[in-house]
């Protein structure tokens, strides 16, 4: 099972599972296609958008556990 941490890059996260994009878009991360966002960590992106990085990582890991289990 894929697990991410606060130091996982956004670009890497989207390679793990592209279905994670709606979660990021729903919290205001509309710059997923920007080259600079690809090299940002989850923690950096969360802080820029006023999101608790630990809560975001937990939400992403819960999603990945469910989404990848159905593939």
Image (cartoon, rainbow, N blue to C red):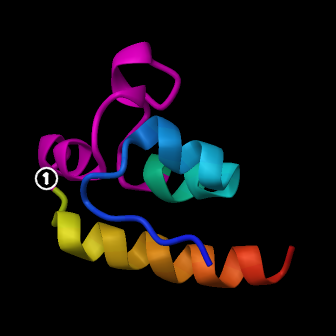
Q: Is residue 43 magenta?
A: yes
Left or right relative to 53: residue 13: right
Q: Residue at x 26, y 52 (%)?
A: 7
Left or right relative to 33: residue 7: left
Q: How far from the left and from the top, in percent, is residue 59?
A: 41, 76
The residue carrying pointer 1 sits among few (fewer than 14), some (14 to 19) or many (20 or more) residues within 10 Å by Cα, namely few
Specify start and end residues of the magenta stretch as a single range: 26-50
| Closer to us: 25 or 10 | 10
* Residue 51 placement: quadrant: bottom left
* Residue 71 placement: quadrant: bottom right
Farthest residue to the top: give it.
35
Farthest residue to the front: give it.
1
What secondary structure is found at the residue carrying circle 1?
Answer: loop
Above-or-below relation of 11 to 54: above
* Residue 20 placement: quadrant: bottom right
Q: How far from the left and from the top, in percent, is residue 46?
A: 22, 51
What residue is pinned by disc 1?
50
Above-or-below relation of 31 to 26: above
Above-or-below relation of 46 to 59: above
| Closer to us: 5 or 57 | 5
Q: Residue at x 47, y 76 (%)?
A: 61
Q: Quadrant of the N terminus?
A: bottom right
| Closer to us: 60 or 1 | 1
Above-or-below relation of 46 to 63: above
Q: How far from the left and from the top, in percent, is residue 3?
A: 48, 72
Q: How far from the left and from the top, in percent, is residue 6?
A: 25, 59
Q: Is residue 23 magenta?
A: no
């Amino acid at each position: 099972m894929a697990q991410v941490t606060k130091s996982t890059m956004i670009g890497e996260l989207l390679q793990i599972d592209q279905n994670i994009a709606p979660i990021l878009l729903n919290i205001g991360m509309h710059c997923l296609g920007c080259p600079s966002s690809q090299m940002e960590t989850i923690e950096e992106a969360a802080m820029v958008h006023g999101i608790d990085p630990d809560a975001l990582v937990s939400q992403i890991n819960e999603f990945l556990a469910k989404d990848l289990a159905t593939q």
